[in-house]
C-alpha cells in the first residue's frame, strides 16, 4: 500500500481549472519529484494535499486513511510536514531558538506556561542533536535574519523535519539559491533519512535527477507522465513540453 495517495483531485480558481484529475502515489521512503513548467499547478497541488486549499473533487489518503478534509495541524501530527516557497522562520530569533520552537510545537506540554522552554532538557538535547548532525552548531546563536538565504532555506527543511514526519513536502527547496547553495541543498536532501518519504517540487534538473526515485510531470494541471528518472529523461513528449522551449525556465 502506498503511504501517500492522491486520487483524481481537481481544483479551480473561479473559471481557471488549475488541477485536473491529478493522481499520484508515494511509497514509504520514496523520493518523488514533481516537475512542470511555471503555472503547471505544482504549488497548488501541495496546497491541496495539505488542505491549505480545499479540493473540488478527488481525495488524499495517508496510510490508507482519507485526510482530504483534515486541518493542517492534524496532518502534522499524522505525519505530513512541508516547507513553503517563502521562508516561515522567525527572523529575530536565533537558529537555536527557532529549532526550540519547532520542537516544542510538537510536544504535548507546549501550552504549559509554568515550564519555560529553556529548561526542557529533552528539547535542549534534541536541538543539540540537530545542530551537530547538520553541522550548524557554530551558527546556533546567530539571528535567523542574519543567515544567508541558502542557510535560511536549509533551516526551514530542518524545522519541517522536527515533527518526525512520514512524508515531507519540499516546495522548490533550491529556488533563489546560488549554485553553491543549490549543490549544498541537494546534498542535504540526499542525506535525509529513508524513514521519511519526500515529495519535492523542483525546477533545477541536476537536483531533480540527483534525488528522484520517481518523477511526475505536470502540465496545464494534468499529470502527463509518472515514471523513473530514465523514463522521464527519454520520453519524447516530456522533452518537447518541458525541455523543448515551450516552458519558461526559472533563472
Ligand atoms: N489563489 C489563486 N487564485 C487564482 N489563481 C491562482 C491562485 N493560485 C494559483 N493560481 C494560478 O494557478 C496556476 C497554477 O499556479 P501554481 O502556483 O500552482 O503553479 P506552479 O506550477 O507551482 O508554478 P511555479 O513553478 O511558477 O511556482 C497559475 O496560473 C496561477 O496563476
Image (tube, helix red, strand yellow):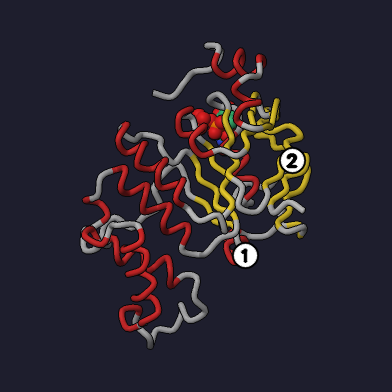
Q: Could you say where residue 103 lies in the image, as x and y percent from the top left?
A: 43, 69
Identified at 35% across, 78% down, the residue is 117
Q: Is residue 116 visible?
A: yes
Q: Could you say where residue 126 lies in the image, as x and y percent from the top left?
A: 39, 72
Identified at 36% across, 82% down, the residue is 120
Quadrant that contains the C terminus: top left
Quadrant of the rendered structure where residue 179 is? top left
Identified at 46% across, 63% down, the residue is 162
Whether ligand 1 has any atom under 8 Å from the Cβ at mark 2 is answered as no
Q: Report the front residue among 171 and 190.
A: 190
Q: In which of the image's four quarters is ligand 1 placed?
A: top right
Q: Is residue 14 visible?
A: no
Quadrant of the rendered structure where residue 123 is? bottom left
Report the residue marked by disc 1.
74
The crowding category of the residue bearing disc 1, from other C-alpha atoms within 10 Å (few below 14, some 14 to 19, many at least 20), is few
Q: Is residue 93 left or right of residue 215?
A: left
Q: Report the front residue among 51 and 230.
A: 230
Q: Could you say where residue 230 lies in the image, as x and y percent from the top left?
A: 61, 27
Q: Report the front residue among 137 and 84.
A: 137
* Residue at the bottom extreme, as displayed: 114
Q: Are marks 2 and 1 in contact (CB under 8 Å)?
A: no
Above or below residue 176? Residue 25 is below
Residue 120: which numbered mark, if any? none
Q: Earlier in the sequence, mark 2 or mark 1?
A: 2
Identified at 77% across, 43% down, the residue is 7
Cα–Cα gap, marks 2 and 1: 20 Å
* Residue at the front extreme, as displayed: 230
- Say which element carries label 1: helix
- Say which element carries label 2: strand
Report the residue marked by disc 2.
9
Q: Could you say where residue 183 lies in the image, as x and y percent from the top left?
A: 36, 37
Whether ligand 1 has any atom under 8 Å from the Cβ at mark 1 is answered as no
Amino acid at each position: 500500500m502506498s503511504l501517500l495517495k492522491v486520487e483524481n483531485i481537481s481544483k479551480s480558481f473561479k473559471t481557471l481549472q488549475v488541477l485536473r484529475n491529478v493522481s499520484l502515489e508515494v511509497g514509504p521512503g520514496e523520493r518523488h519529484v514533481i516537475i512542470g513548467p511555471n503555472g503547471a499547478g505544482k504549488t497548488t497541488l501541495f496546497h491541496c494535499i495539505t488542505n491549505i486549499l480545499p479540493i473540488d473533487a478527488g481525495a488524499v489518503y495517508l496510510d490508507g486513511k482519507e485526510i482530504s478534509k483534515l486541518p493542517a495541524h492534524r496532518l502534522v501530527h499524522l505525519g505530513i510536514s512541508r516547507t513553503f516557497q517563502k521562508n516561515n522562520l522567525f527572523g529575530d530569533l536565533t537558529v537555536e531558538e527557532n529549532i526550540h520552537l519547532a520542537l516544542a510545537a510538537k510536544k504535548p506540554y507546549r501550552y504549559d506556561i509554568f515550564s519555560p522552554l529553556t529548561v526542557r532538557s529533552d528539547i535542549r538535547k534534541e536541538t543539540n542533536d540537530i545542530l551537530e548532525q547538520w553541522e550548524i552548531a557554530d551558527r546556533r546563536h546567530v539571528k535567523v535574519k542574519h543567515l544567508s538565504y541558502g542557510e535560511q532555506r536549509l533551516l526551514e527543511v530542518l524545522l519541517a523535519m522536527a515533527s518526525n514526519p512520514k512524508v515531507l513536502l519540499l516546495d522548490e527547496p533550491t529556488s533563489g539559491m546560488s549554485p553553491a547553495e543549490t549543490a549544498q541543498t541537494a546534498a542535504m536532501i540526499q542525506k535525509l533519512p529513508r524513514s521519511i518519504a519526500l515529495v519535492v517540487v523542483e525546477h533545477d534538473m541536476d537536483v531533480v535527477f540527483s534525488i528522484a526515485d520517481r518523477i511526475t510531470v505536470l502540465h496545464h494541471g494534468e499529470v502527463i507522465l509518472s515514471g523513473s528518472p530514465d523514463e522521464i529523461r527519454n520520453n519524447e513528449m516530456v522533452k518537447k513540453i518541458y525541455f523543448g522551449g515551450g516552458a519558461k525556465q526559472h533563472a
